[in-house]
Each structure stands twice: as structure tokens, then as C-alpha cells.
Amino acid sequence: MIDGETILLGVETSCDETACALVADGRRVLSNAVATQIDLHARFGGVVPEIASRAHIEAINTVIDKALSDAAVRPEQISAVAVTREPGLIGSLLVGVMAAKTLAWTWRVPLVGVNHVYAHAYAAALDAEPIEYPAAALICSGGHTALYRCGGPLDLELLGTTIDDAAGEAFDKVASILRLGYPGGPVIDRLSRDANPQAVHFPRTLLAGQSLDFSFSGLKTAVLYHVNGVPGTVRRRSPAPAGKTGIENFSEREIADIAASFQQAVVDVLTIKLRRAARKIGARTLVLGGGVAANSALRTSVAALAEKLGCTLRLPPMRFCLDNGAMVAGLAYHSLRVGQVSDLALEARATVRR
């Protein structure tokens, strides 16, 4: 504790970022250290779980030391240790959970297990004013796309989730089809800024009725067929010569237009579903979280939606869109305040038990 503030150390290792942060009173970020693994996974076009786990083991001590050093905080000033315990890659989660248990035991402070997705829904409160509830939260990343009703930091109700690909996963797969590299989200966002999002009409899968679930596999397949042709049919596309298929037949401008058209389809679906959720729960606030929340087109679209609905919009700063320890420590502060702490038998879980 410093000057009456309650300081938590947060550890996050659910996927391919090894992260640790120190946060005071749930919102003031004292440090936020992250070791990324993008270069390790780029040649595979996605995260390889075994490689991710080993990289976490190699980086975890260094990242924790950096977070403590950057914050100029001593162990005796820390009130609790928080850690992502679900959901995620089980091997990656185990590294963080074991590190957090060790610190909590050594420092003789409480341990707080945190849901990774719930932490993303809280990220917009970091270094900012508290979120005004009730809120409709859209969490979209490489592994998750879901809508929540948020009645408070710890009061979340799942409204809808993806039935196949997550939005970020779709970005990565389409980037692979277009040979744009990995990760797909940032490069598609960048290309799309000077391209035509109406060049190709890709499907918007909204599912039946007023469903709040998501589906992006059909959109991904539509991009694949647009580029490579529909299996078993004669490919006709202008200006490429009739009968020729493959990305090599598309100019850089055409590829950018395909990327922009795909991105617009994703943004349209996410925005429509968020609008449905906000109206259903009578939201006062719209919240974005997760890696895809950094997408410029999505941020613009949701800002327009918030204005139309008369809602406050809470967007996390770019550094808190990606996986980070600050959102873990921030959310855990609220758990600590109401006595929701874990013991050293805390288990990592790849999926959330309902």
C-alpha cells in the first residue's frame, strides 16, 4: 500500500503475451510490462500452444521484475496478486497461475483468480473514470467474440457469443488468404484506410431473429471463394482473365479493396449486434474490449452508434486493448474489496465452467 492506495500485481498469460502490471485502487496504472510472442508465431500464421507455453516460462520472471521496477513498488507494498485463470490456452495459463501462486505464498498476500474476458470488459476503466452501468460490452479478439450485460465490474451476464470463428481469428485467416502476413488485424486495418469498403459485397451473417450470437466462418469462406473461385465451378471475375484464379491475379489495389470490404462486413455485424444488446438491456454505456477493439473502423462505427443511442462510449486505450496485466489487476481489486479471493488450490481452466 502506498499513501492509502491498494496496490495489486496482475499476471496475464492466457495466450501469447506474457504480461504483468501494478495497479492502484483498481484504476491507476503504475506499470504495464508486456513481452509479445508475435515473431515466434508469425511463420505459422497463428499461435502455436506449445511454443507459447515455453516462451511464457522464459519471459515470466523478467516481465514481473520489470513491472515492479517500472512502478518502483516493493513486494511489501502489494496488497494482493491477481492472475488470469480462465479462459485461454491451458499450457499458457498454467505458467501464469503458478507464478502468481508463488508470489502470493512468498509475500503472504491474497491470491485472486480472474476471468480473462471479464477483464477486457473492465479495461476501459484503466487510467480513466469508472464505467457507468448498466453497460453493453462487446469483447472481440482472436479467441473471443461475445456480448455481455454489465451491471458492475463483477456483475456480467453473457448475452451472445460466436458459434464458430472469433472476429480476430477471421481477420487472421483472411489475411492469410490475401497473403498479408500475421497478425491479420493491424495490416487489414492499415490497408483498408485508403481502400473501398464497398468494392465487394460480402455476406453479413446475422443469424435468426434478434440473435446476439456471431458467426464469421461464412464470411471467411466468401473471401476465399472470391479469391480462389468456388470449387467445381468455372471462375469468372473481372478484370482478371476468365478462368484464372488465385491471389496472384489481383492487383495491390484490388487486394486492399477486398480487405476493406471484408473488414466492413465484420464491423457491420459487430455494430448491429451491439445495438441489439444495448437496446435489450437499456444500456447507458457501450464498452469495447479485446484486440479487435483497436480496429479504427470499429471504433468509428461504435462511436456513431453510441451517439445515435444517446449512450456514453468507453473505449480502452490502445495499450489496454491487447492482453495485459493491468486489466487483470484492475478487475481483481473489486474482487478483493468484496472478499472474493482464491486459495493456493486455484486451477487454470481452458474454458469457463457454467
Image (spheres, rainbow, N blue to C red):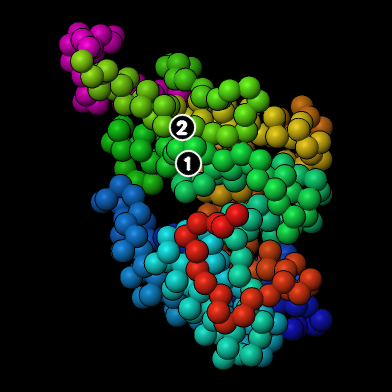
Q: Where residue 117 is drawn, which disc sits there?
A: none
Residue 58 seen in render: yes
Q: Determine which quarter of the picture holds residue 234.
A: top left
Magenta part of the chain: 233-261
Circle 2 SS class: loop
In the rendered image, the vertical position of residue 229 relative to residue 34, given as above or below = above
Q: Amino acid at mark 1?
A: Ala
Amino acid marked by disc 2:
Phe
Q: How many marks?
A: 2
Residue 216 bears which disc, if any?
Answer: 2
Place of residue 94 in the rendered image (x, y in percent of width and height, measured from the top left): 45, 71
List x then y, in percent, for residue 49. 34, 60
Q: Where residue 191 sits: x, y (%)?
A: 42, 33
Do tag 1 and tag 2 residues touch (Cβ < 8 Å)? yes
Q: Residues within 10 Å of mark 1 (few under 14, many from 20)?
A: many
Residue 166: mark: 1
